[in-house]
Amino acid sequence: MCEPTAKEQTILKSDIDYAAAPSVSFPAGLVVKPRPTGPKSYAVRSLEFTAVCYWVTGFLFLGISCLVVFLFLLYAIIKHISLLVLFTVGVPDRDGKVRIDSEDYLLETLYTTILLLFVTSYIYYWHCDAGAEDRGSHPWRRIRYWGLWNRMANYFPINLVLSEELLKSDHILCVSRDQNLRNSSFGGLPRNMNYLVGYHPHGVFSTGAFINFMTEATGFSTAFPGLTPWLAVLKAHFKSPFYRDYLMSLGIIAATKGGLLYLLEAEKTGTGNFVVVVVGGAPEALEAQPGQYRMVIHKRYGFFKLAVQTGCCLIPCVSFGEQRMYKQLPNEPGSWLRRFQDWVTRLSTFAPPLFYARGPFPYR
């Protein structure tokens, strides 16, 4: 996402479960869509911060909020059906006479009918659409072009950088480093193949993976015309009603064997699929600390097997600066906090990192 600092050019604290190297020299590459430079007005900085607030609060609270809203709707149906029963039977007044207010009865009937139709229709749709996250989801491509994502990319800033190794690939045309992509001879990757992208590091939110591949803020379609990007996340995200539909509208799929095979096997969905997997998953999120890159690859070889099985191309992707967005409370392996976090991760598949920056909002 950002240019690596000198400290970040060494991968620290590696052990048997982590891929590490004593010293890493990061190659230069081609920035697809350079971010604007120079001073920004207060209004522009406020809009960028608002975009980041939307992303952070959505990531943290949107799933549980949608679940709470759905449960509230179910409660409201029960409540208003009970009120209709009372209206039908009638409510005795002080004299013991039963009176029915026809106007209130009609309003209550109309409200309950609309509410019941909405909830039952969604439940029926949810039942019929079950497992769509394993079948390519329901992407709505116009969301990729929201100006909100561009503001968010400018906040950090986030850049999509093509490495020199990729530019020199036999499958594409080479371009000099100082040329702008739109004015170059870069032709992108072949459209007659599928691609499995292994993304590191996870960070706290995998912000780089989302902005670079699920939006057009950094120029994905300009760099790779004809390819369709997908981002694989935990299947548990799709358990929340409404939230699951929001994720699938972005082109997000479940990180399951079935979900990945559906897009990578050319016989099922054709070619041109660019599937991004945050390989380290929840355990790697607990390793997100500024100045170090601990990449979890232990017991992650299934992704490589999928590439061999389907014949797709395997592409590595590293996000520089992802680790600098947040700090975490000290949670070295073996500490009581880390043991608790590992226990929660095994129990729920979610990682509970205790992070901070400017409150819940990230550093630039």
Image (spheres, rainbow, N blue to C red):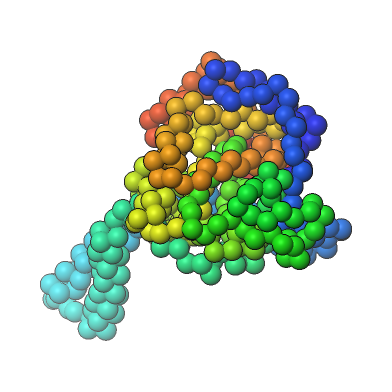
Q: Nearer the viewer, residue 74 or 197?
A: 197
Figure quadrant of residue 225: bottom right
The x and y percentages for residue 274 are 51, 53
Number of marks in the image?
A: 0
Residue shown at the point (65%, 42%) measured from the top left: 319
- 117 above or below 296? below
Q: Residue furthest right?
A: 38
Figure quadrant of residue 288: top right
Residue shown at the point (31%, 53%) measured from the top left: 131
The x and y percentages for residue 102 are 22, 83
Q: Nearer the viewer, residue 248 or 270?
A: 270
- 15 displayed left or right of 179: left
Q: Nearer the viewer, residue 204 or 179?
A: 179
Residue shown at the point (83%, 63%) measured from the top left: 41
- 200 displayed left or right of 117: right
The x and y percentages for residue 352 are 51, 34
Q: Residue furthest front?
A: 170
Q: Residue furthest bottom?
A: 103
